[in-house]
Image (cartoon, helix red, strand yellow):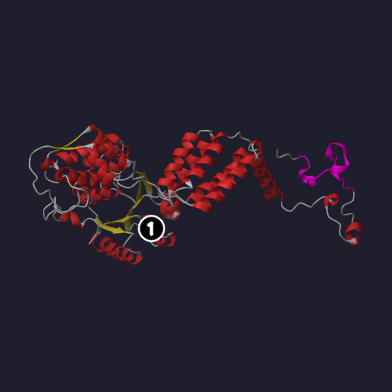
Amino acid sequence: MDLFDSQLKSKSHSPLADRMRPTTLDEIVGQDHILGQGKVLRTLIEKDQLRSIIFWGPPGTGKTTLASVIARTTGADFVALSAVNTGVKEARAVIEKAKDSLKFHHKRTILFIDEIHRFSKSQQDSFLPAVEDGTIILIGATTENPSFEVNSALLSRSRVFVLNGLNNDSLGNIIERALKDSEHGLGSVKYSLDTLARKALIDASNGDARTLLNMLEYVGLLCHSGLDPGSSSATDSDGIPASAGMTKKTITLDIVQEAIQQSMLRYDKNGEEHYNIISAFIKSMRNSDASAALYWMARMITAGEDPLFIARRMVVFASEDVGLADPKAIMVATSVFQAVHAIGMPEARIPLAHAAVYLSQAPRNNKAYLGIEAALKDAKEFGNLPVPLHLRNAPTKLMKDLEYGKGYQYAHDIEGKVADMQCMPDELKDSKYL
């Protein structure tokens, strides 16, 4: 069974998100930049002229749905696999079958691989020959940045289409469609959604249509039953509200909050969002915006980030950005790192906040950071330059005979504590890093 076999069967027992999955390009919302009239991707799909492509976007933005629409409209054979539960062996079998289809029937094969980033780079290599010679047209879907997660050779032979997280208007349209659709949605129950409840659902979905519809289905059940989450007595054996009638039922903010339970923040500790948020945190401190720094820190803490990772980044920041302007900053950051290590979460949030605010409000001097970067550049460029003889140590007679240490001036014996003495190699004698 592939990803789309279920669409050929009755959806009466499927989750709302599956029942409401768009089946045409016009039903897909929020991606007009690639699917609007005259846009490249829409044209390629409608004319059945697809080449290998990668869909990249957050969860619930329509990557698999687009593949489903292509499966319905293309004249090619269409095979869908998921990297979560299939491997290269299955993919190679598809490729062999595609060769026969092309050879004997002159028919192309589109291979859709969901979560293609789950395949290793070497596993992705196995698709290259078939993509290059046109045996298959590959469609990959990923939530991760293809630049990091997709083999560069495969990426160069594919076109990347970015799917955006859904905005509030798009999410609102999805809610309205689900509430009005009597065949696949919740229209038979006649729910209404008050303004605050709608906003809470949209905010909690984080631009994810699947999450939004799953929550909407659950709050609908709670609204109809008036029971606590987890109760099974409010539905019949088919999962439909036991006394669903035509009386309009209002979904309130209280019901939504009860269903949501807690914030659903999207954050992948190994993916791009991880780097985006830590970048926002560092740059907020650099811009002396303590409130923003606390917000981005809260995002990381709420999502389960390792608090020691946050503390380590602040130790680096204390030297790189605050630096010589406030030598105590490195002491504060290091002490906070030790405190976080000693006490753990949730108490560690307090010293972490202490350090973030301190560093945000501290003066700035990055001369030491810029200096070491310049020095490293020269060290790599000029290689192993010899140490001037007068700076060399001379523990043996031979070294003294070779004039090691000759002409060295002890700075403490000189007025002003600075000797008129070259300390750089001859090739860099005029270089200044500070």
The part of the image, by quadrant, that contains residue 427 is top right
Counting from the top left corner in percent of width and height, residue 430 is at 77, 39
Choose between 50 and 418: the one closer to the eye. 418
* Residue drawn at (20%, 46%) of the image: 217
Q: Which residue is mark 1?
A: 118
Image coordinates of residue 366 in percent, x first then y, are 63, 38
Q: Give x and y (percent) for residue 29.
A: 26, 39
Q: Is residue 390 visible?
A: yes
User: Which residue is nearer to you in this view: 102 or 217?
Assistant: 217
Which residue is pictured at 26% across the width and 47% down the height? 210
Residue positioned 56% across, 34% down in the render: 361
* Magenta part, dominant SS: loop
Q: What type is the residue that disc 1 sits on?
A: Arg
Q: Residues within 10 Å of mark 1 (few under 14, many from 20)?
A: some
The C terminus lies in quadrant: top right
Q: Is residue 285 left or right of residue 9?
A: right
Determine the secondary structure under disc 1. helix
Residue 415 counted in the magenta span: yes
Residue 226 is left or right of residue 165, and the answer is: left
Q: Quadrant of residue 375?
A: top right
Q: Quadrant of the N terminus?
A: bottom left
User: Is residue 202 left or right of 357 when viewed as pictured?
Assistant: left
Q: What are the residue bounds of the magenta stretch?
A: 407-430
Say above or below: 363 vs 71. Answer: above
